[in-house]
Image: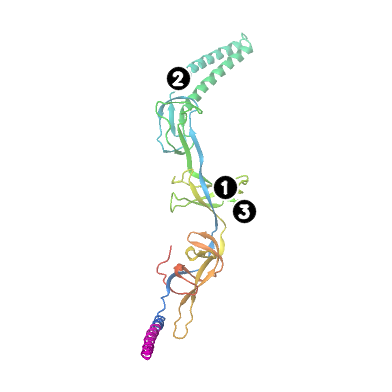
Amino acid sequence: MKKRMFIMLILCLIVFGGIVGFFFFKISMMKKYMGKFAPPPAVVTTLKATQVDWHPSLTAVGTLVAVQSVEIAPQIGGQIIKIYFNSGDYIAKGTPLVDLDISTEIAQLKADQAQLKQAQLSYARIKKLFKTGSISPADVDNALAALQAKEAAVEGDRAVIAKMHIVAPFAGKLGIREVSLGQYIAPPPASGGNIVQLTSIDPIFVQFDLPQQNLPQVQVGQAIQLTTDALPNKEFMGNITALNASVSADSRTLTFQGQVSNNTHQLLPGMFVTTNVFLPIEKNILIVPQTAVVSSLYGDSIYVVKQDAASGDKPAGLHVEQVFVTVGQRQGINVVISAGLTAGDEVVTSGQLKLHNHESITVNNAVQPK
């Protein structure tokens, strides 16, 4: 009985060992078979690092400011009898805006003109009498003073009447009308005295701040470029016109003022803009597309394409090497590389997320990233 059980145990061990052996043999053969199939090379796009004449710039956030802006208000109170403008109009200098009722002033002018005529006649008679010795020089002086007072009164009446015909002091864009026909308005600070806001917007000023360390790089006359999210794909060119007299003690920045042409009237005072101050051109600066730079906790790097040497039955191919670089100013789609690359290096511009150092690649430049 024991002998039979021992034989059965041996047979079971043989069968079990055969199954286990076959299992490991199967795994070994599968590994050997799969090892013949390497993953395909990653497909990437590339461009060569090039040297160009670089136009560096300083960037700041600016605010648009009107060259001139004023609330049109009367100098003399009166009732509005004529309105010549509409809200939002673009007007020239001297354009009529509002007429006030001048009936009372016209009457006063006629009365003063009558008194002036009487003073002129009186002065003429007194001069004749003075020549005959009938009156003293003091009488002549008094008559002349009375005549000049009447002339001044007439001129004052005409000045008052002129001020009641209100015109634009300069060319610009009108705001929203603040008065109505028949309304009585009085000079500020009386409530309801403003007629409309007039703002000159062509040209227009931009004000922006730069750190004090940039002062040696910026001067009056330098070219500037403005862009704004409100007007995508639009660029406005101008020049720096003034620098503030002192650096801010709080921020250690200096305020600059630039002037920009705005003949399309698309820029409005108060808008935020991105201001680029162009600096002198730098020669032979190495640039690559910004998409070529991979940023990480370890720094900025770029994958450079290298040629594989053919060996045995393995044909020549391409692989990438990751190099760490020093990144400079960014502008448009390009970025300056100040260290880590040389001109002519072929760099990967898309597909980096699936790459590792020394990985084989295939280049397909049919479509380039933008």
Task: Give whichever of 205, 149 is nearer the camera.
Answer: 205
Q: Which residue is mark 3?
A: 213
Say whether disc 3 or disc 2 marks the residue closer to the N-terminus: 2
Q: Crowding at label 2, few (<14), some or many (≥20) Cα neighbours within 10 Å?
A: few
Judge whether 84 appears above or below 311 on screen: above
Give amino acid for label 2.
Thr
Task: Give whichever of 94, 151 is nearer the camera.
Answer: 94
Say whether disc 2 or disc 1 marks the residue closer to the N-terminus: 2
Give amino acid for label 3.
Gln
Indicate which label's residue lies in the foreground, 2 or 1.
1
How many marks do you count on the picture? 3
Judge whether 147 appears above or below 49 on screen: above
Q: Is residue 253 visible?
A: yes
> Picture quarter containing residue 351?
bottom left
Report x, y in % for residue 72.
Answer: 48, 33
Report x, y in % for residue 51.
Answer: 53, 66
Query: Label for residue 256?
Result: 1
Indicate which label's residue lies in the foreground, 1 or 3.
3
Q: Main secondary structure of the magenta part?
A: helix
Q: Which residue is mark 2?
A: 104
In space, the residues marked 2 and 1 are separated at their CA atoms by 51 Å
